[in-house]
Image (cartoon, rainbow, N blue to C red):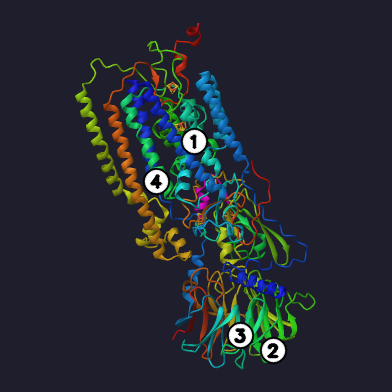
Amino acid sequence: MQNRRDFLNLLCRGTILTGLAATTGVLAYRSVKGGNCDLGTSCNNCKKSESCDLPEAALFRQTVWQLDPTKCIQCGRCAENCVMSPSAVKVTHVYAMCGYCDLCGGYLKPDTKNISTAAENQLCPTSAIKRKFVEDPFYQYTIDEPLCIGCAKCVKGCGAFGNGSLQLQIRHDRCVNCNECSIARNCPSDAFKRVPANKPYLLQGIEAKPEEKNKV
Amino acid sequence: MKQKIIIISALALLLLLIIFMVKDFFFNNPGNTNPYQFELDNIRKGDSAKAVFAETQQIKTSLEEIHGIATDTSGKIYVSGKDSVAIFDAKGKTVNKFRIAGTAQCIAVSENGKIFLGIQDHIEIWNNRGEQLAKWASLGTDAVLTSIAVKGENIFIADAGQKVVYRCHIKGYLLGKIGLKDPATGVPGFIIPSPYFDLGISKDGNLWVVNPGRHSFEKYKFNGTLLSSWGKASMATEGFCGCCNPSNFAFINDSLFVTSEKAIERVKIYSADGTFLCVVATPDQFESGTKGLDLAVDKQNRILVLDPVKKMIRIFEPKK
Amino acid sequence: MKKTLALVFLVFLFTIQFMNSYGIQRFPKPEFESGYVQPETLLPNPRAEVLAILDIAVLIISLSVVSWLVIKKRNRNGVFWMSLFALAYFGFYREGCVCAIGSIQNVTLAIFDKSYLIPISAIIFFVAPLVYTLFFGRTFCAAVCPFGAMQDLVAFSPQKLGSRLNAVLGVIPYIYLGLAVIYAATGTDFIICRYDPFVGIWRFNASFGIFVFGGILLVIGIFIARPYCRFLCPYGVLLNWASRFSRKHITITPAECIQCRLCENSCPYDAIDIPVTTKNPESKGTMARKLIFITFLIPVLMLAGGWVGSKLNEPLASANAKVRLAKQILNPVTEKNQAETFEIQAFKSAGKQQRQAFAEASEVLHKFYIGSWILGGFIGLVFGSLIAGRMITKHQTDYTPNKGTCFSCVRCVDYCPVKLPLITK
Ligand code: SF4
Ligand code: SF4
Ligand code: SF4
Ligand code: SF4
Ligand code: SF4
């Protein structure tokens, strides 16, 4: 009786272990080899090309969340739905695309009568955008990141009137990289996706290379 | 007894949590109001009342992307875009369509019927049968040609990339550069934050160039002397909105300006000295986000607006 | 020749650049004369990838140490300190992410969605605790899982619930697990993470709702020890089953049970099976009748469950974004002066075809249809086994931890008067 039970136990244990091992093997193999693209091909040639954003194979490749600014419609949910408050999504200024305009659509309210930097003329609800004179007629705009709540108002203004140099991004110094980003499930334009941690930004207009040190 | 009460209330709390989860998951859709709404709609609506023009005709183009529009003296309409140029008669029937290599951002037609195309960084000359007559050298790797105007032997080319206007001879050699910043002569220099930079030649033989970053029109002699300028930055109907506008313009009745803007998509008419006269088309007539409404005026003084989003020519005439 | 090729290539590049409809990206910036230098756009890196190795190492070492403490040392104090460490590392330092419970969803998604690259660390967090449990019982729950550790700390006055209540409430984790798998497999949502009760506390930063959720659970935990583990945790289901086949398991007594009943009330989790000795054993006939009844009951319940589930597939699928969008396209908001929903706005601005949206939605619906049949059948099976388990009385002579539900916390061991050195003498 006791023996039979032990044998049954062993059998079940063996089965479960085999199953676990098989799953681990398949998934690990796939993730080490790199992803399959939507086309269903598992080629290794195109992966090296510029246009392919599949992660390169790496043993401990992690994924992080990022939003695609070309899809974003500036609905304002980024400010409200992050597990962090204020949101880990903030506006990122791509200086390389900026027109340095005096009448910045991302800085001034659209119905501003006379141009002045008074707070009531500023579009940003938290006055997170700082304006600095460069030379006639150019102004530099910088983001005071701790103030920004990621509401995307300026992004909309810049996109409508200017060059689209203000873009929302998840800032990885703030993001805790939730297993499922709680903005992702509420984003109406499906802009959020998991990206490989070695290419954690999806900005338009610059080669998005992280420069700062890793956060620990 | 006490134990029972504790257990029951604890279980009730647990149940509450589960009910909360279910409710939150199935019945809590994210709200549909944005507390940080960017209020552009009011401004867009504000303009609608003032329109005295009506849209009388739409001509669909079969091009993949459309960028430039021009008319000739006989009333034909020319549209340039990605890989092709299309020619329509005044009624909207396709007269000809031919393929080109590249995307022609701008187009102009000379008095003798030659078609000038600005393709990224160089000029090409074609005839209306679709034969290439000439292809000029590149104007530089940074060149982004956005407008052409032809008058007799002179051809003026607006280069938004290098922020300058070239004056060339029709044979292809450079006669001069116009609009480079020069404090001595008072030329302020063009401020072009985005690739919209238009020019045109008025009846009195002067060159008008948009300085979009300064929201103004500048009037030059053909030799580059700055004569005058006008323009006002404002979100209100009377002025030009945003960081860089107007994006395009054309002449009507040989002296009035028809202008178009991006961001608040509107087409308006100004007098030659810059007095606002009336609205032709209002923002609600365009998809929001439409950029690059190129303009032309035909023989019958109809205003032709190129709508790159709807991919058609939209014709406006005064309301009866 | 080379030159022409290069030229052609250049021209080609230009055309590409020009075709890009999202503005001309390399449009020259203003020419500054004052020597202004354009600042760099700062992009902070995420947590370094190599640190994933640290997480894995901590997991494996903790599992090994705790298993050794439980099986070899039978030392409650050690287990307690290890659980504090787990709470500090996996809870407060790693802020509850990466966790074994949530990794169920990563693994599921990776199985069903080939484009999802699951990090190796997530696989290991899923597999390692199960493997250890197969050998040593639920030592992971004892002192490696931060959820368990958190609740263990507040279990001040645990009440006995009685076996019937325990069994009925014990069904919830199965349903939770089934739903979590279905939603992960369809790429809808990660519900385990969404209703992760303690993550707000560990991050010191969360919406009010999540704080309250965690707080209430801890309050319940004072009286009903480890409520999340026993009545919600979906990973607990897997561990429960793995533990039933475990090679070794904690025992209350180091040698032989002397029926002193001292440990009877020692387990805060009602996980001790008490001896069952029926005076007059059931006749062969009743046994056979019961068996026949059960063999009929289970398939019937499974079918019924599947059928009910399949009827529920649309409400279940309504949580999916694609399905929601299709619904909104079909019934647009008709109320006056109410703008169209953001979903519709986004759909329009993306320039997608309605047909495409409907096709995607119906594909998801189909997946949910199949999924809800399976889910319903699974729940039917769970209920069937529940009934079967209660009908068949197991004979048992000693006080032993229930291999399935015991968390290997080693509390009961101290209550047993039998001590090993006494015996060996
Ligand atoms: S939720 Fe999506 S659409 Fe809304 S602002 Fe964020 S990224 Fe943009
Ligand atoms: S407007 Fe909103 S997104 Fe832009 S800087 Fe201010 S807070 Fe940030
Ligand atoms: S992953 Fe989490 S912290 Fe990061 S943006 Fe999303 S919700 Fe915020
Ligand atoms: S039952 Fe679940 S939550 Fe509880 S300790 Fe085990 S894995 Fe953690
Ligand atoms: S080790 Fe003992 S006290 Fe702890 S859960 Fe198991 S049976 Fe209960």
Instruction: Say whether disc 3 or disc 2 marks the residue closer to the N-terminus.
Output: 3
**Same chain letter for marks 2 and 1:** no
Could you say which disc has been placed on residue B170 in the image? Answer: 2
- Crowding at mark 4 (Cα within 10 Å: few <14, some 14-19, many 20+): many
Q: Tell me the chain of label 1.
A: C
In this rendering, would A43 be left or right of B19? right
Q: Is residue B243 above or below residue C250?
A: below
Per the model, the C-alpha gap separating discs 3 and 2 is 13 Å
Instruction: Say whether disc 4 or disc 1 marks the residue closer to the N-terminus.
Output: 4
Identify residue for label 4.
Answer: C182
User: Is residue B224 part of the magenta span, yes or no?
Assistant: no
- SS type, badge 1: loop
Q: Residue furthest right?
A: B184
Residue C322, image x, y percentages: 41, 56
Per the model, the C-alpha gap separating discs 4 and 1 is 23 Å
Identify residue for label 1.
Answer: C198
Q: Is residue A47 above or below residue C299?
A: below
Q: Amino acid at mark 1?
A: Phe
Q: Amino acid at mark 4?
A: Ile
The image quarter in which residue C121 lies: top right
Identify residue for label 3.
Answer: B108
Per the model, the C-alpha gap separating discs 3 and 4 is 61 Å
Per the model, the C-alpha gap separating discs 3 and 1 is 67 Å
| Residue at left offset 49%, top offset 7% | C422
Whether pointer 2 and pointer 1 mark residues with C-beta atoms closer than 8 Å, the reply is no
